[in-house]
């Protein structure tokens, strides 16, 4: 924008208005640039941490403490830029949960911190079932089988009827509760049976559900629980269809 220098009072007023307009425009552009750079940096940090976490979840605790610290620093930086971003809060909860399991943090303190970030994520995004499932998993890791855990499970179940992560949570928890004869199984038993069926139907969770059935040597029990399901589903369990035919 070209600005003509004033010759009269009227010109001076016009000049000042133009000068102020240019300054305001430049300031606004600068603020937008800073915001865009912050957003880009936070997004980069988020995807970097998500990739590191995916490797950890696939490979177990083979990642080093240095990689853990890198992930933690990156997602904390993203949250500093955008503290009200639910995904970032959820991801920091996952990082602290990783730190607890890998022994990189004090376990109880890290699990409590993970829980706090998951809860913050549910406040920002209350309808996301996976975060509620993560909260239930934290309660399990803390060995706190109480009404709060049931509330988290119920939210995950209601909000994520087709979510593979919720299928796996219920199958993992149900198998463990059954194996230990834990009384909480009575509170989730029907949903547990349903989630086995749903988990086997979903391609994203099928292999892991079958692996859990094998891990707990539960094929006979699962056959019994699935006896009213279609034969195509029963055939996924070794010899299941034959057993149910003869029973």
Image (cartoon, rainbow, N blue to C red):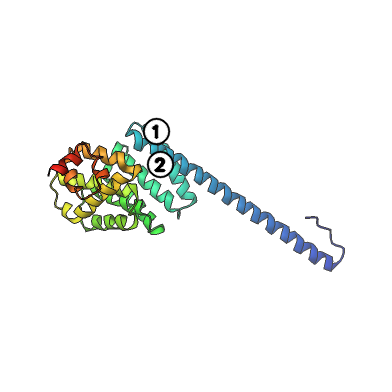
Please, what secondary structure does the residue beneath circle 1 have?
A: helix
Image quarter hosting the N terminus: bottom right
Q: What residue sits 32% from the left and 33% below the top?
A: 61
Number of marks present in the image shown? 2
What's the mark number on residue 72?
2
Would residue 92 be visible to someone looking at this image? yes
Task: Say left or right for 125 vs 140.
Answer: right
Height in image: 154 above or below 177? below
Q: Position of residue 89 (x, y in %)?
A: 40, 50
State yes or no: discs 1 and 2 in contact (Cβ < 8 Å): no
Please, what secondary structure does the residue beneath circle 2 have?
A: helix
Q: What residue sits 75% from the left and 59% below the top?
A: 19
Q: Quadrant of residue 232?
A: top left
Q: Earlier in the sequence, mark 1 or mark 2?
A: 1
Q: Position of residue 216 (x, y in %)?
A: 19, 39
What's the mark number on residue 66?
1
Task: Say left or right for 44 vs 212.
Answer: right
Q: Nearer the viewer, residue 93 or 194?
A: 194
Dot 1, how many residues are within 10 Å of its Cα: few (below 14), some (14-19), or many (20+)?
few
What's the mark number on residue 214?
none
Q: Position of residue 217 (x, y in %)?
A: 17, 37
Task: Say left or right for 89 vs 134.
Answer: right
- Furthest toward the bottom, the residue is 10
Label 1 to label 2: alpha-carbon separation: 10 Å
- Furthest toward the front, the residue is 245
Task: Say left or right for 183 vs 87.
Answer: left
């Amino acid at each position: 924008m070209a600005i003509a220098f004033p010759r009269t009072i009227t010109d001076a007023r016009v000049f000042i208005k133009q000068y102020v307009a240019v300054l305001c425009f430049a300031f606004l552009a600068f603020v937008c640039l800073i915001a865009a750079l912050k957003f880009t940096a936070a997004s980069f940090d988020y995807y970097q941490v998500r990739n590191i976490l995916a490797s950890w979840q696939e490979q177990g605790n083979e990642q080093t403490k240095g990689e853990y610290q890198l992930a933690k620093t990156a997602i904390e930086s993203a949250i500093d830029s955008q503290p009200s971003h639910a995904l970032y809060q959820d991801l920091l909860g996952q990082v602290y949960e990783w730190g607890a399991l890998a022994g990189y943090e004090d376990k109880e303190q890290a699990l409590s911190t993970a829980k706090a970030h998951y809860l913050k994520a549910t406040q920002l995004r209350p309808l996301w079932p996976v975060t509620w499932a993560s909260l239930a998993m934290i309660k399990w890791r803390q060995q706190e089988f109480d009404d709060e855990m049931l509330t988290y499970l119920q939210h995950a179940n209601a909000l994520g009827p087709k979510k593979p992560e919720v299928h796996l949570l219920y199958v993992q928890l149900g198998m463990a509760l059954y194996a230990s004869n834990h009384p909480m199984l009575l509170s989730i038993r029907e949903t547990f049976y349903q989630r086995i069926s749903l988990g086997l139907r979903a391609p994203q969770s099928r292999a892991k559900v079958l692996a859990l059935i094998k891990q707990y040597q539960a094929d006979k029990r699962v056959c019994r629980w699935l006896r009213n399901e279609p034969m195509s589903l029963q055939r996924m369990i070794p010899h299941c269809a034959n057993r149910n035919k003869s029973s």
